[in-house]
Structure formats: C-alpha cells, structure tokens
Amino acid sequence: MRAFFRLFEVLGAAHRLYVPDQRGHGDSSAAPDYSIAGFTADAIAFIEGLGGGPVHLGGHSLGGIVAQRVAAARPDLVRSLALISTTRHAAGSPALHETVPLLEELTDPVPEALAREFQGSTTFAPLPEEIFVRYLDETRKVKADVWRRALGGLVEEPAPHDAPSDILALIQWGQEDGLFSSADQAALRRHFPRASFVDYFETGHAPNWERPAEVAAALLAFWQGLDRQETNS
C-alpha cells in the first residue's frame, strides 16, 4: 500500500481509492503460496467484494503483472489498466534471477542494511530520507520466506499466452529501470495496442516514488479522458 502513498492526496481528491496489501506484504497475513496465480485470485476476490467493478486497476512492478492477469482472467472487472514499471512476464529479468541466490540465507527480521541497499538500488537518485524510511519500514515487514517465495513465483511463472488486449491502458516507466527494460515496455505496448505510454528521464524502477506529482497527473488525465469518452459516447 505505501508504494503509492505519495499519490494519495492528489488521486483521492477526485477518486475513491482502494489500495490493498498483497498476501504476506504490509499488514496482510501469511498465505499458503506466493504465486502470481495466488496474488491474482486475491485481487479478483477483492474487486468482487467491492461489488464487482469494473474498476480502474493499477499496479507497480509485481502488482502490474498481477493487474494484467486479472484483466486477462476477468475482463468484466476491469475498466482500465495503469501499469507502472512492469513487464508482461518477469522470468526473463536478469536482475531478478541474480537476486534469487542472494535471498537463500536471508533471515528474520530482514536486516535494515540489506533492505536499504535493495530499495535504494531501485531508484535513480536518492529519495529524501524521511520519505525513503517509510518505504524501508514497509519493506522490512515482509518476512524472509515471503521474499524468497514471491520472487520464486515471479521468475517461475509460465509465460502468458493470452491474445493482445483491446483494454485501455496507461503504461509508465523510468528510463533507468534496472529490473524491466525498454524491450519489456515494447512487449507491453504490443499486447495493449490501445495503451498510452509515458517514460521518465533519469528515473528508476519506481516513478511513483521518484516523480509522484507527474505520475499522479498522468493517471488523472488518463482517467478523466476515459470519463469524457463515456460521456460523449
């Protein structure tokens, strides 16, 4: 949830926001598995619990992959997609594969130095300490076993084979993203041919952390454009 806290004030003024913690993350409880399929089932159940949508569904990184799987499995629940620094399929990310053996000896509580190094490496420029520490505290809530199994679920997920989607999407990405490349963004745009695309100069894996005002403005413009289309149709 805290991955988006710098967007809440702007987006919440015009929209009702629901920002659940995924299983094993934040204040959510543990779960039997941390596969993409499990995260997807949770998201579908959450939207159904709200009344069934359709909703503007968004996600960053892992969350963006889950959002795509929800849209593929239950397009009736999704009005639009907002994808931030994500990919069609994470199994091809060299950075993620390099991280897998580094987590084998990870223990609880997750050492602050390790969490600080990992999260710091995802940004292009250092964040203000008072902002960064909020992300850091949330990162350290995740248990070592969840780190390992969620990363395993990412890199072991079978490649999706759903047909290109006509859903309206907004794709946002930082040009210095160390996890997902420009080729990953091209693959997203091929899969969502009606998508709008915004890339950010001198920005890493988390534009929502590094450029919250710009990310929020892009989201508002995207949603407002959809509202105008519906009003005029």
Image: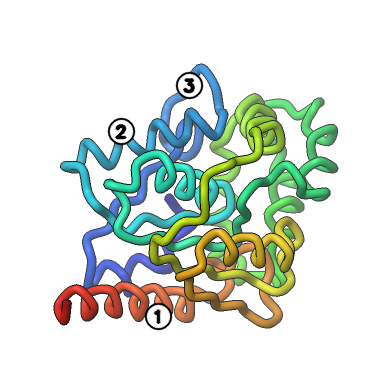
The reply to whether dot 1 and dot 3 touch (C-beta < 8 Å) is: no
Crowd class of label 2 (few under 14; some 14 to 19; many from 20; radius 10 Å): few
The reply to whether dot 3 and dot 2 touch (C-beta < 8 Å) is: no
Q: Residue at x 55, y 59 (%)?
A: 191
> Left or right: where does residue 7 sit relative to residue 228?
right
Q: Residue at x 77, y 32 (%)?
A: 103
Identified by mark 2, the residue type is: Ala
Which element carries disc 3, helix, strand or loop? loop
Mark 1–mark 2 Cα distance, whole angstroms, equals 29 Å
Tell me the quarter of the picture where residue 157 sits: top right
Using the image, tell me which numbered label, if any, was put on residue 31.
3
User: Which one is earlier in the sequence, the residue at label 1 or at label 2?
Assistant: 2
User: Which one is earlier in the sequence, the residue at label 3 or at label 2?
Assistant: 3
Which element carries disc 2, helix, strand or loop? helix
Q: Residue at x 24, y 37 (%)?
A: 48
Q: Is residue 168 visible?
A: yes
Residue 228 in picture, x, y percent from top left: 21, 80
Identified by mark 3, the residue type is: Ala
Q: Residue at x 67, y 74 (%)?
A: 203
- Which is more foreground, mark 1 or mark 2? 2
Relative to the observer, which residue lies in front, 108 or 86?
Answer: 86
Q: Is residue 194 above or below residue 2?
A: below
Please give the residue where the numbered disc 1 appears in the rendered image. 217
Using the image, tell me which numbered label, if any, was put on residue 45.
2
Residue 38 in picture, x, y percent from top left: 48, 28
> Left or right: where does residue 76 sit relative to residue 201?
left
